[in-house]
Amino acid sequence: MSNMQRLKSTLLNKSNGKWYQKGKWYQRDKLYTGIIFFDKPDHQLEAYEVKNGEISKPYVSPCQIGLPSPIQIDSSGFCNEDEDEYGCGTIPQFYQGKLYQGMSYTFNEGICDREIYTIENGETENQIMWRTKLHEPSMFELRYEYDQSGFYYRNSRDDINFGYSKTCKKTNRLEDIDITYIPKLNRIKRFTAIDDIIHSKNYLDCPIPVPGIYELIENYQHFTFDTFIRLRISEDIVEDLFDKWAKNNSFIHVEFMYITGLNGLYNLEIFNDKEVFNSLKELRLEESEVLPQKIEQLKKCSNNFKLVIYK
């Protein structure tokens, strides 16, 4: 029930025990499927999942998974995020004069446009912003302490960013993926793939589906990178990825590249190959993350590009 409509009951009709969405003057009302919110005294709310007009169970926001919330509130007009003009993330949520821990929602003409979970000090822990007409997220940040995982997503005017990370409690190994995509150019400007994330596909556990991003990652071998690209790749998979990207002309537009994971790349001459990196001007890396012998090899083969090493 993630990418569904989220409406207050005042926008719906109830008939014969079922909830209907009001149609336009030329349409019949249709059985409602989505989330329904009921106003209670003192800005409190009750929220339920509805399927084919019938209430099925209480709604638990993706922001609240594994977290307590004795009550839920409509914070429209006094939301802490609205008061956070500079995006510092430290403005607390208050309710009835006290710091508020729990779920709060904001609404635009009865349509939910934001879900927020605030912790003991009133600061935002998790949040989702919804586009009210498309019923899809414009942004979310979700952190789950119980399994040490996290998801984030931002869909702005210029690009789309999605990320997932999880640390295994037993091995302390990090699994991480991060991608920034420019729809207008159909290009990638940032990509992270740590551990076995490409094959495990654990990012699909995201409680808010983003199928467009999933399809993009699934076709990673056919990426086209932007003129400036940041890559963080596990050393054990970087050779395989570069081989696939080279064969598919993924680097054709790249002029500036910042990269980590180079210790796993055996063929460093690839950066000097004009058939692969036709436009490369500058390769940037951190000295602490690259073996000294790799740096020496790069210095010897940097005929067609500038090598920048950050210390």
Image: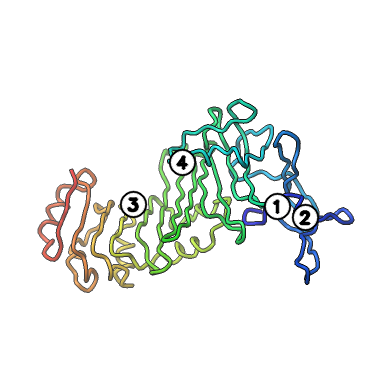
Query: Which one is earlier in the sequence, the residue at label 4 or at label 2?
Result: 2
How far separated are the C-alphas under marks 2 and 3?
51 Å
Crowd tier of the residue under label 3, counting other residues whose Cα lies within 10 Å: few below 14, some 14–19, many 20 or above? many
- Where the N terminus falls, by quadrant? bottom right
- Residue 161 coordinates in the image, percent (x, y): 44, 55
| Placement of 292 over or under 52, stated as above or below | above
Looking at the rendered image, the disc whose residue lies closer to the viewer, 2 or 3, is 2
Q: Amino acid at mark 2?
A: Leu
Q: How dense is the environment of label 4, judged by Cα within 10 Å: few (below 14), some, or many (20 and up)? A: few
Q: Which mark is residue 234?
A: 3
Q: Disc 4 on helix, strand or loop? A: loop
Q: Which residue is mark 1?
A: 7
Cβ atoms under marks 2 and 3 closer than 8 Å = no
Q: Amino acid at mark 3?
A: Ser
Q: Which residue is mark 2?
A: 12
Q: Amino acid at mark 4?
A: Glu
| Quadrant location of the C terminus in the rendered image | top left
- Are dots 2 and 1 in contact, CB under 8 Å? yes
Q: Disc 1 on helix, strand or loop?
A: strand
Left/right placement of residue 287 relative to residue 42 reads left
Q: Are marks 1 and 3 in contact (CB under 8 Å)?
A: no
Mark 3 residue element: loop
**Residue 23 spot, x, y in % from top left:** 76, 65
Q: Mark 1 to mark 4: distance in Å?
A: 27 Å
* Of residues 240 and 281, the one drawn nearer to the viewer in this rendering: 281
Secondary element at image label 2? strand
The residue labelled by disc 4 is 85
